[in-house]
Image (cartoon, rainbow, N blue to C red):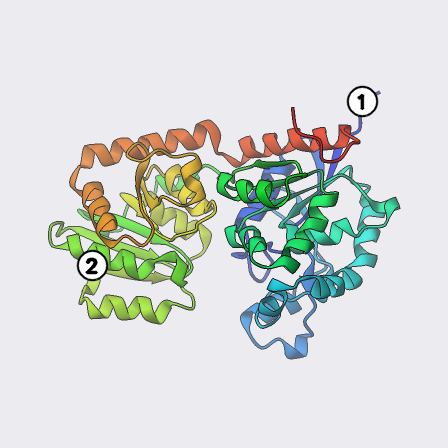
Amino acid sequence: MPSRRLRVLFLASYFPKPDNPLMGTWALSQAQALARQDIDLLVASFTAWVPASLALTPGAKAYAHCPQHYTWSGSVDTRYPRWLYYPVNPFKRWAYTDPVPYLKLAWGSARQELCQIITEFQPDVIFCHHSLPNGWVVAQLPPPFRRPFLTLDHDFDEIRDCHIYPRRRMAIQTVADHAWAMLAVASRMEHDIQQLFPQVRSLTHHNGVDPIPQSLWNQPRPSELWHKKIILSCALFAERKGIPLLIEAFYQIASAHPNAILRIIGSGPDEENVRATVERLNLGDRVQLLGKKPHPEVLQEMVWADGFALVGWDEPFATVYLEAMAAGLPILCCSDGGINDVIQNEVHGFTVPPKDMAATAAALDRMLIDDVRRREMGVNARQLIHQKLTWDARAKELLDLFEKAVSSPVQNVAIA
């Protein structure tokens, strides 16, 4: 008699909504890769309850109008139960240092539906994006509904700040006490987990990327981009992303590369500062702000580009680097980011110290001045993706962990 397929319940509150498909795209890509394995997968994305009459912003409308159930491409069956958890300020700020009161409210509003989902789906293992809130909520499950569970954290600060805020540490300690394993997207984050919660099984699990669709490779550059050397950047416009610094660095070397342009995709709270920097330096069309773009258009811009630069600091393991590498681009990044777990300086691109204007300008100059070396690094980057960092390869590693969790009844035992 054939064995029963592994059943995985994937909890991800930061997950695309039908009216907000750009939210957490990497979480959907990971779920699609898991669905391609020989398992049964159900995603539960607990969603803030927002009455339609009070939904005035696009973000609030995406919550209010989100259906209870949706199937994404790749047969990713997704439930969107509601709860009283709002990952926006001021609620997010209030709950950051002392999460438990807010988490109790989330658990109280989610308990019935989560238990119902477990009763109906009968998962063998639960996979939680982020220790808070999803891992904490799963740790509260009554005995009949408990399953081995793993968490995957994506943000340096959310773990590191446990050194500073004891009540935050206590909240994640609850997760560490119950989880089969706590995973981190970067080794630097795993090191913090080991220091803070030495009794828990911890390891690094990097994000992945899907291959660039062939149709994008077949699309030629628009005529206005002919004979240009394109450095592309793509990010949320927030202070930590360092977009003004990148623009300033490009300004320093722009006169030496008259056919080079910097194209930047994104928007966000620091947009006024970004635009002011371009205007102050009188860069005209040498720096092109493209605004927010749908994901397929971002990938197309990568295929058209010659190099990719994002010098944000404290980048855990941004999938945008992987996408650029999959498009055959050398990357320019900061030396403190999680991507340094897998790339080598001057092999797959250039790394620079955080917030170092001179080093960033020098790296841009080197990327632009040597066409042969730039293309070699791009080839190396693409090969690295295909060898180790596709979502399918990462999903197979996760599946191996899930099977170990299900077969191991003892909690917090080191992986052999």
Q: Nearer the viewer, residue 78 or 136?
A: 136
- Would residue 409 appear left or right of 369 to someone viewing this image? right
Q: Could you tell me which secondary element the residue under label 2 belongs to?
A: helix
Q: Quadrant of residue 211?
A: top left
Given the current orientation, which residue lies at the most extreme top position?
1
Q: Which mark identifies residue 341?
A: none
Examine the rendering and report whether any part of residue 265 can be seen.
yes
Identify the residue shown where x is 13% and y is 49%: 257
Which amino acid does the dot numbered 2 rest on? Arg
Residue 234 spot, x, y in % from top left: 37, 54
Q: Residue furthest right?
A: 144
Q: Residue under label 1, please give it.
A: 2
Kind of residue sitting beneath label 1: Pro
Nearer to us: label 2 or label 1: 2
Task: Tell me where residue 273 appears, x and y as whole percent.
Answer: 32, 69
Among numbered discs 2 and 1, the one appearing first in the sequence: 1
Location of mark 2 (residue): 286
Q: Gap in Å between the C-alphas at discs 2 and 1? A: 62 Å
> Residue furthest toward the bottom?
53
